[in-house]
Image: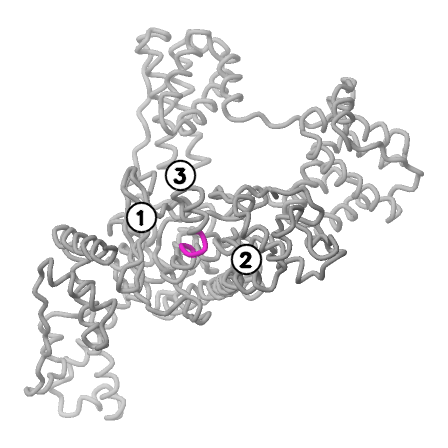
Amino acid sequence: MLTEEKLRLLSTYLIPDYFTVVEKFVNCQKYNRRLLILHLLDAYQGLLGPPIKNNDSAALTKAFVHIRSHLCQIHTKSVAHQKLTLLYSLTKRLIDKGVFTEYFIFPDKPYSDSAHKAYKAQIIPNKYLVKIKSKKINADEEFYETLSRTCSLEISQRLREHVYNFKQIKQHRGPLNNYLNFVFAEDPRWYEHPKVIEGTLLKFRNNLLKKVSRNTAYRKFQNVKNAIAVLRDHNLISKETDFPDNLRRCVKTQQVRLNNPLLCTTDIYDEREKDLFRNTSDFIKELTSELANNLNLLLEEARKIVLDGYQKFKEQSQIISNSQKTEFLKHPDLRIIKKYNPFSSACSSKTLRKNNLVAYFDHFYECFINGMPKHDLEGISYSKEVQQHLGLTTRVASAMQTIIIEELGINPYSLYNVKVYSDGHGHEFIQVTDEGSVKLRALKLRARHTKTRNTIRSFVDPIDISEQDIDAATCLKMALEMTNRAREFTNQKELWLCTSKYGISNPIPSTFQNQFKKIRAKAAKKSELLKYATLTKVRSSKGVWIYLDSNGDSLKAANYFGNTVKTTLARYIPDYLTELVYRVKIRSFQHVLLFMAVTHDESPADSLQLTIADFRTQVIKAFDNPDMGGTLYESLKSQGSEHDTSNNKYFCISLKNIILALKYVKNGEDQDLKDDCIAAISKISEGPIILKLLLRQAEKKLNSIEDS
C-alpha cells in the first residue's frame, strides 16, 4: 500500500488537528521511515488515540509503557529502541504544535540488554492488548487455519499434501482457500453433500468472472476443481459428485489490465476507450512521440546517475593517495602524529576523514565485504559516502538496469538475478567480446530457458564516454568492473554485487525497485506520467514504440521482447493498434492506385486539381513506401547507374583464419581491415551453432597462446 493510501486510511479515524501534524511529520521523513511511522500509528492507534484526544497525560504515559513492552516482546533491543524513538518524536511534535497541552513524561527507552529483558517480561493487561492491531498472519498460516476450521481431519491432510506438492504453491493455495471459506459459509458439513459441492463450485466459478479476467478465472477454477477431484478419487467425498465444466478459454489471450502498462496518457488496451481513439496516422505519431519522450526522460535521469557513480568509483586511487594511509597503517592502533585518530571528525577535516575511511576499507577489504570495521575506533563508519568509492551502489545498479532493459528488452527479474558465469541450468554468462559488444545470457525462470542478448559494439573506454552515449554495453562493462573485486573475494557469480549497510550482497528485487522509485520521482518532475513508471512498463513501452516506429514490424517487436510473434501480438500489441497501422498502410496504397488511375490523362496534375510541383511531390511521397514491396515497387523505383559496381568481400572460414582475424582486431593498425575483421567475426557469431562453436574454439586457442 502506498504512503498516500495509508495516510488516507489514518485520516478516517484521527481527529483533524492530530492528522494534520501527523501528515506534515510523515512527509518530511525519508521513504523507509515514512512507512515505519505509518505502520506504528496503524498498529497502536487504539492505545494512543483516546489519551491524545482527551488530553490525558497519565493515560498516554500508561499507553507508552504498554507499547514499549509490546515492542520489546516482538523485536530486538535496537529495533524496539528505534521504533519507540519515532513515536516519541511524533508525540513531541504534537506537544510543540499545541495538539496535546498536558505536561508529559516519556517512559525510559530500552537502552541496555537488561532493560530490554525487563520490559519484555512485563505483562500487558488484556484490555490494552486487544487494542493493539495484531500482525497479519502469512498465507500458509491462514491456509492451515482455514483447513482446520472448514474440513475434517482426513480432508484437511489430503488437501495440504495436494497443494504443497506443486512448485508454484500460491497458485493453488489461494483459490482453494477462498473456495473453502465460501463453501463452509453455505454448509459447515459440505463434504457430506454432493449437491452443495456442485452448487457452490458453479457459484464460485461465476463469481470469479466479476473479479478477474476470463483466463485468470479459468486457471483459478481449474486448480480448485482439481483439488476437489482429488478428494473424490480418495473416497473422501461422494463418488456421485459431479463437477461443473470450466469456463471456455478466450480465443484471444489479450490480458485485461487494471492499469495502463505503457508510459502514455492513452490506455490503448482499454476496450471501453476504443471509440475515442482517432483512426488516423496522427494518433500513431502522437503515441509514438509520447512514448519516446517519456522513455528519454527516464533514460536521461538514469544516465546522470550512472556517470556520476562511475566517476566516483574511478576516483578511488586519487582519494587513497590523498589520505593518511601510510601513517596510520604503521601505527598498531591506527593513529597518526601525536596519536590522533585519523577517522575522528574532531581531528580531521571532512574531506580528509572521508579519504582515510576509503583507504581503510580498501586496505581491510574483508571489512568492506562484511560491512563491519575490524578495529574499535571512534569515527570508523561504513557510510554510503565511502561505499560509492569502493563498489557498486544499489542506486547506480538500478539506473544501469533501466538503461539495459530499455535497450535490450530483457525481463527485469531475469536481469536482477543475472550471473557473470554459471555452471547450472542454461549456462548464464556475461561476456565482453573483442568487437566491443557485450553478450548477455540470462535465465527466465518461469519459461525455464535462457535467452542471449547482444549489445551494440563500442570501443570507447567507459571513463571517456559522454553522458548521452551511455548505453547497455557501457553499463554492463561498468558493472563488471565495479563488482569484479567483490566477486573474486566472495566467489559469488552474480553481476549485481552491491554495497549496503550489511556489506556486499546480491540485493532482492524490492531493493532495486525502491531505488527505481527514487529515479522515477526525479524524472516525474518533467512528466507526471512517470510517477507510476516501472521497469516492466519501460520494457512494454519500448516494445510498442518499436512496433509503431517500424510501421508495424511485428518481427522487430518480437525480437525485442524475446518472444514469438504470436505471443508478442497477443500480449503486448492490442488488436486496435494493429488495425490502425494496417489502415495507414492501406491508405498509402490507395494513394498509389489513385496516381496510377490518372496516369493516362492528358494532365494528371489537373485531374487531381494539383500544381505540377505538388503533384510530383505527392507521387514521390506515395511511392517512397518500402512496406509496399513486390515487383511493382522495385520497377517503379529509380534504377541505379549501369556503371555502379558492388564491393563484395569474402571471408574464408577456418579455425586458422578466425584466430588471425581475432588477433588483428586486437593488434591491427589498418582501421579498414580491422573493420572488415570485426564484420566477419560478427557474422560468424550470428550464424549456425557449428560456426559459433568454431569461433569459441578460436577464442580459447588465442587466449591459451597469449597466456603462454
Q: Which mark is residue 316?
A: none
Earlier-in-chain disc, 3 versus 2: 3
- Spatial CA span between label 1 and label 2: 26 Å
| Residue 57 screen position, x and y as percent | 90, 33
193 sits to left or right of 365: left
**Residue to which mark 3 is pinned:** 213
Q: Nearer the viewer, mark 1 or mark 3?
A: 1
Mark 3 near mark 2, Cβ–Cβ under 8 Å?
Answer: no
Q: Which residues are magenta?
A: 479-483
Q: Which mark is residue 389?
A: 2
Earlier-in-chain disc, 1 versus 2: 2
**Residue to which mark 1 is pinned:** 429
- In the rendered view of the protein, which quadrant contains the N terminus? top right
Q: Is residue 460 above or below residue 189?
A: below
The kind of residue on which mark 2 rests is His
| Secondary structure category for the residue under label 1 | strand
| Secondary structure category for the residue under label 2 | helix
